[in-house]
Image (spheres, helix red, strand yellow):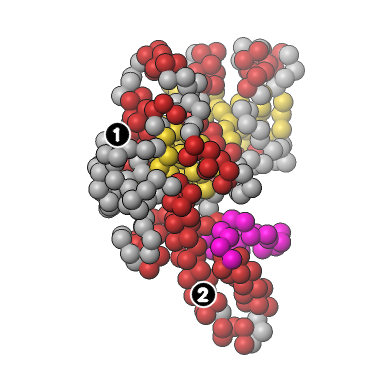
Amino acid sequence: MGFKTGIVGLPNVGKSTLFNALTRTAAAQAANFPFCTIDPNVGDVSVPDKRLDELASIAKSQQIIPTRMTFVDIAGLVKGASKGEGLGNQFLANIRECDAIVHVLRCFDDDDVTHVEGRVDPIDDAEIIETELMLADLENIDKRLKNLERKLKSFDKEAVDHAALLEVIKKTLSSGIPARNVELENEQIKSFKLLQLLTAKPLLYVCNVDESSAASGNKYSQLVDALVKDSKASSVIISAAIEEEISQLTDSQEMDLFLKEMDLNEAGLDRLIKVGYELLGLQTYFTVGPKETRAWTIRVNTLAPKAAGVIHGDFENGFIRAETVSYDDYLEYQGESGAREAGKLRSEGKSYIVRDGDVLNFLFNN
């Protein structure tokens, strides 16, 4: 299981350049005019994880298969998008299909790159997009409340409970607060998720800075840091221009040297994925053998049978037990046999909660 992330933002903030770099393609046309992107571009990319190489080396695996994530480059939104302005509602629908939102904010000065609002102000840019998404959510909520009117007249309990939830959300949105900040009762969480509200999706701000600010940020990214400090959103600093250069490099040593010259410890994609995983509550487990070493993505607190089901439904349905060893122990004892001899390989049942970095082998009935 990977996750699908929509890249949004005002026109000309660097969305398509970032998409091209992250997916290492030229699929998204990058140009200095509004609405350059019309149809959403979709790119499926490998999730970098250095643990795979170390595990494969010990197991002498013939193949390494990383887990994957999908980026969707969505057209630039503008004021009035919720009412169909610009390329409006079509692209709000594209966002609705994503698991999370990466909102690219322009955090650089460049007179040669036009800003649709005629200035550089990442906080105002963030508010424009957030407002449009909240307006779209409010319209969604109003439609749902209207559809419940008949059932409410007959005092249908399920309808009454659902309407109460919708009213709480509506009040929050009307106050200018996104749905992700709504305080929910435990019994409301499932219904809330089914609404698929735009402002309920996990949000990651990407501060697109100039090359000289890639390592430590600048005055604009500092404003974004303050914006997310007390919110349920996160932020990461990336220079789309640098990522574009990195995407052209094929030699790992050359890439490491380039990153060192830019005072960066890792590529922007690595940082984006780490923050994105944390934001979505995701983690990775591994299956390791002579044929292949493979990474699998699951949600935090996933039980062993459900984790097995990510590989194949039969693994979950016929689950007997899981043999597991931690990544650190697998490395220390040089594989499954060594870990077993050291008493570090465990047999776990259906109630086992899989941990990040677990090396798993599932036993199941056909």
Of residues 359 and 140, which is closer to you in this image?
Answer: 140
Q: Is residue 237 visible?
A: yes
The residue located at (61%, 69%) in the rendering is 171
Q: Nearer the viewer, residue 85 or 211?
A: 211
Q: Is residue 259 visible?
A: no
Q: Residue at x 32, y 41 (%)?
A: 16
Number of the label disc, if any, that sits on residue 25: 1
Answer left or right for 58 relative to 207.
Answer: right
Percent coordinates x, y for residue 1 in the rendering: 50, 41
Q: In the picture, residue 192 is in which quadrant?
A: bottom right
Neighbours of disc 1 within 10 Å: few (<14), some (14-19), many (20+): some
First of labels 2, 1 by sequence position: 1
Name the residue carrying label 2.
142
**Image-based side of 31 in relation to 252, left or right:** left
The span picked out in magenta is: 175-197
What is the x, y in percent for residue 239? 40, 32
Q: Farthest right residue?
A: 343
The kind of residue on which mark 2 rests is Asp
Q: Residue at x 53, y 42 (%)?
A: 223
Residue at 42 percent of width and 39 percent of height = 107
Can you give x and y, in whole percent of width and height, for residue 153 in the image?
Answer: 62, 87
Whether residue 63 is situated above or below residue 86 in the rendered picture: above
Q: Residue 84 lies in what quarter of the image?
A: bottom left
Vertical arrangement, residue 194 with respect to residue 31, above or below: below
Classify 181 as above or below 354. Answer: below
Locate residue 195 relative to residue 351 in the image: left or right. left
Give how far apart the Cα atoms at labels 2 and 1 are: 41 Å
Quick check: 2 left or right of 279?
left
Determine crowd level at label 2: few under 14, some 14-19, many 20+ residues with C-alpha closer than 10 A: some
Residue 45, compared with residue 257, is above or below; it is below
Please state, as top left, top right, bottom left or bottom right, where the C terminus lies in the image: top right
